[in-house]
Image (spheres, helix red, strand yellow):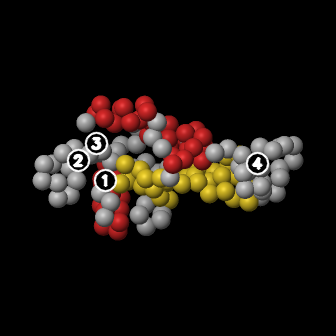
Amino acid sequence: MAEKNEEDWLSIADEFNHRTNFPNCIGAVDGKYICMCKPDGSGSEFFNYKSYFSTVLVALVHADYKSIAIEVGAYGSSSDCNIFKQSHLYKRLERNELNMPKGGPLPQDENGGHMPFVIVGDGACALSEQSYDRIHTEI
């Protein structure tokens, strides 16, 4: 992942808000199964729940679908949740090493309440309790 600074994240959030009317979003994450031939000696490690052999690509993308970060090569039998939680991106996110802004008020919020920046994804990429607690402690 190319190192992002606070201005980069703010630009990504502005683009998400412009395109989707979803403020304080700095990316969308999801996984994709990539069909492949069974590697020799792999047993069922690459055999997924869809009944074919695959490896998994997990990506964090901008509002314009450009990749911010990707991880590829996980066993097809692994869940998106486990792959995401083992990714370099997730570990850096947990350690607060991504130079992300602390957050701020939402557009048109008359009270100006502080809201953190978020990454959207399906249920497989839910925040852990530690992430949730850390984010709310910072507010």
Which label's residue is closer to the chain start, 3 or 1?
Answer: 1
Q: Nearer the viewer, mark 3 or mark 1?
A: 1
Q: Position of residue 85 (x, y in %)?
A: 55, 39
Contact between labelled residues 3 and 2, with CB atoms less than 8 Å apart: yes
Which label's residue is closer to the chain start, 3 or 4?
Answer: 4
Which label's residue is closer to the chain start, 1 or 2?
Answer: 1
Q: Position of residue 42 (x, y in %)?
A: 83, 43
Q: CA separation, marks 1 and 2?
A: 8 Å
At label 3, the amino acid type is Lys
Quadrant in which the C terminus is drawn: top left
Question: Which residue does the image show at 50% across and 37% down from the upper left?
Answer: 91
Which label's residue is closer to the chain start, 1 or 4?
Answer: 1
At label 2, the amino acid type is Gly
Circle 4 — which element? loop
In depth, the one of 58 and 106 nearer the eye is 106
Question: Which residue does the image show at 87% across and 47% down from the upper left?
Answer: 40
Q: Position of residue 8 (x, y in %)?
A: 34, 54
Circle 3 — which element? loop
Q: CA separation, marks 3 and 4?
A: 39 Å
Contact between labelled residues 4 and 1, with CB atoms less than 8 Å apart: no
Task: Name the residue beneath numbered marker 3.
Answer: 102
At label 1, the amino acid type is Asn
Q: Nearer the viewer, mark 3 or mark 4?
A: 4
Task: Name the residue beneath numbered marker 4.
Answer: 46
Task: Name the residue beneath numbered marker 2.
Answer: 104
Task: Name the residue beneath numbered marker 1.
Answer: 24
Q: Quadrant of residue 20?
A: bottom left
Q: Is residue 75 above or below residue 8?
A: above
Q: Is residue 79 visible?
A: yes
Q: Position of residue 69 (x, y in %)?
A: 51, 52
